[in-house]
Amino acid sequence: MSTPVQQYVPKERQVLTPPAKRRRFSRSARVRFTNRLFTYYFWFSILALCLVLGLVIFFIGKTAFLTFRDISFADFFLSFNWTPEEEHYGAAAFIINTLSLTALTLALAVPVSVGLAVLIAEIAPGWLKNAMRPILDLLVGVPSIVYGYLGLTVLIPFLRRLSGENLGDGLLAAALVLALMVLPTICRISDDAISAVPKKYREAAYAMGSTRLQVMMRVVIPAAGRGIIAAVIMGMTRAIGETMAVVMVIGNTAQLAKSLFTPASVLTSNIVMQISNVEFDSTWNYALHMMAFLLLIISFVLILFIRYLGRKGREQA
Amino acid sequence: MSEWTRTRKMQRSLVYDRLATYGFYGLGILVLLLIFWLLLTILGKGLPGLSLEFLMKLPEDMDPGGGIGPVLFNSFYILILSLLISVPIGVGAGIYMAEYAPPNKFTEVLRICVESLSSVPSIVFGMLGLAIFAEYFQIGLTILGGAVSLAFLNLPMLARVTEEAVRAVQNDVKNASYALGMTKFQCIRTVVIPMAMQGIVTGICLVAGRAFGESAVILLTAGLSTSGEMWDFNLFSPGETLAVHLWYVQSEAIVEDARQIADKSAAVLVIVVLMMNLLFRIPLWISNRRLKK
């Protein structure tokens, strides 16, 4: 590494003599020109990214707010009656289903994935750690449609036999599929958060005579708390926005899911089932766009909440 | 007191500790078994019937024995087109965020933009594509629309992985290159990008794998049909991809062997995605090992 530079410069070459003036000018001008050019290019790319976000908000929002030209605010948010053929556009059932599906998914996924993160970060020996992380990445790689297909062909018959109901699709099936999909997300981010807890905290706790369980439950997990919450919210955004896996197992009926096995529909699945069949200039289409806009707002709020958590964490540190 | 005795409480804590350790290991083993069972189910159902003929043949509407030729081709075609659009912009944006962005309020706003964009559900990108291409430009459901919408979906993720990879380059190396009198762009081109290459390529592979299996966006922007011929490079023909085909076959198809076609398509999807994630990393992994020696 520390080879002297002189070794590479031939002795006979006069390093200090300036080269011909014109050439030197053109070279440095070229360098400065590309430097400037690429500064603008990088600047342009980040602006293009923001432009895409602007496009999303503009195109979805513009159409979404046309909804309220035809139906009232209360009709859309408070009514459970979604029969577009008869001009009833109540989205309350979808909103509540989305929320309950997300809650059920998290209830299933969070204990398992945080437990797994603790295992990987704290307990497992090095070789197991190095094996588990890529294997979890395999789960991320499986396309969502394949999860949905497996849910349809394997999970639903299984649930049908288990519960004795004649239909297996509904919230439970969708939540099980989603739980498997968000597991690696939550697990990886909590794993990072737990690994980032300073070693001295643990050593102090061990020095007081704690067992490993006590160190984990009373020191490490509280210290990594914000990171774990951020991980859970990341999982949440993924669960709320997931479409194809859900649409295959939830049953697609526009009604409130009163039990775990009621065929139901959530915001995403309803949009994807109906959007291809509607006229662009119809209230039906506007209402679907309003649902998409709701999804957008929910995910923006969640992201801002993660940022807020991160900022508070930095202030405390 | 000459002998150290364990109190009851200590005894209990030790037992709990032991039990919890077993519990965590048990959980880990269950999850691992679940993952392997999952992969085995997908691959085990689909692989045995897989043949080159199935991969190349045209799909059939009524008779059994159809293949997935055009949809598989469309999958790769749309993926490559979308990467051609999104990689230069995404990587550029990532480099900007890591190298150029000054620490001020405006950069914060940009960062919020990138994070918000990465949280947008994929179905919303599909609707955006539908609104832009089918409604605004009136060209209907096309390969071009699918590729551009998919590129939108890829952008924030590419920017994020690039930013992480570029940030991981040590400052010493950059300082050394500045000390040689390099301009900022020379430093990025000759020092930063080669050192961050591994991270960037890994990120692109992850994004490509995700984009290959993406179905909600393609379903809305490229449609549920193909032009019906193999090797159709026309940007304006409908472009059903393999992931969408899986959805179509299990929900609407009326051929007898729909179930087998779906099984095989799922297996092909998973294999291709795994290949993208693993195979492309091997050369990098080897060169990395050589560097370390």
Image (spheres, grey):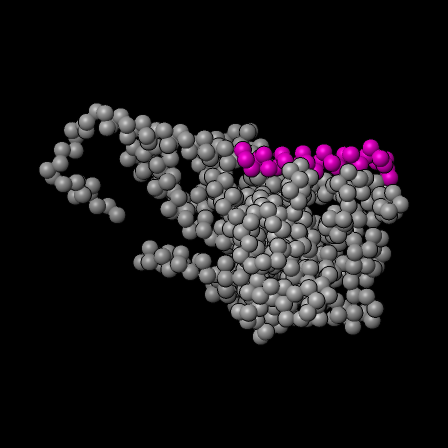
Magenta residue check for B198: no
Magenta residue check for A70: yes
Outermost residue, bottom side:
B48
Outermost residue, left side:
A12
Residue A5 visible at all: yes
Identity of the residue drawn at 51% across and 43% down: B85
Q: Give the quarter of the image for residue A217.
A: bottom right
- Residue A30 vs residue B286, the one in the foreground: A30
The stretch of residues the image draws in magenta is A47-75
Determine whether, in the image, residue B31 is placed left or right of residue B95. right
How far across and how far down the image is residue B104, in percent? 52, 29
Q: How many marks?
A: 0
How far across and how far down the image is residue A221, in percent? 60, 53
Determine whether, in the image, residue A116 is placed left or right of residue A39. right
Residue A194 visible at all: no
Identity of the residue drawn at 36% across and 57% down: B287
How far across and how far down the image is residue A7, in percent? 16, 43
Q: Give the quarter of the image for residue A69.
A: top right
Identity of the residue drawn at 60% across and 63% down: B58
Magenta-colored segment: predominant secondary structure: helix
Q: Quadrant of the C terminus of chain A?
A: top right
- Residue A186 vs residue A176, the one in the foreground: A176
How far across and how far down the image is residue B223, in percent? 66, 51
Determine whether, in the image, residue A108 is placed left or right of residue B95. right
- Residue A281 vs residue A8, the one in the foreground: A281
Identity of the residue drawn at 80% across and 36% down: A67
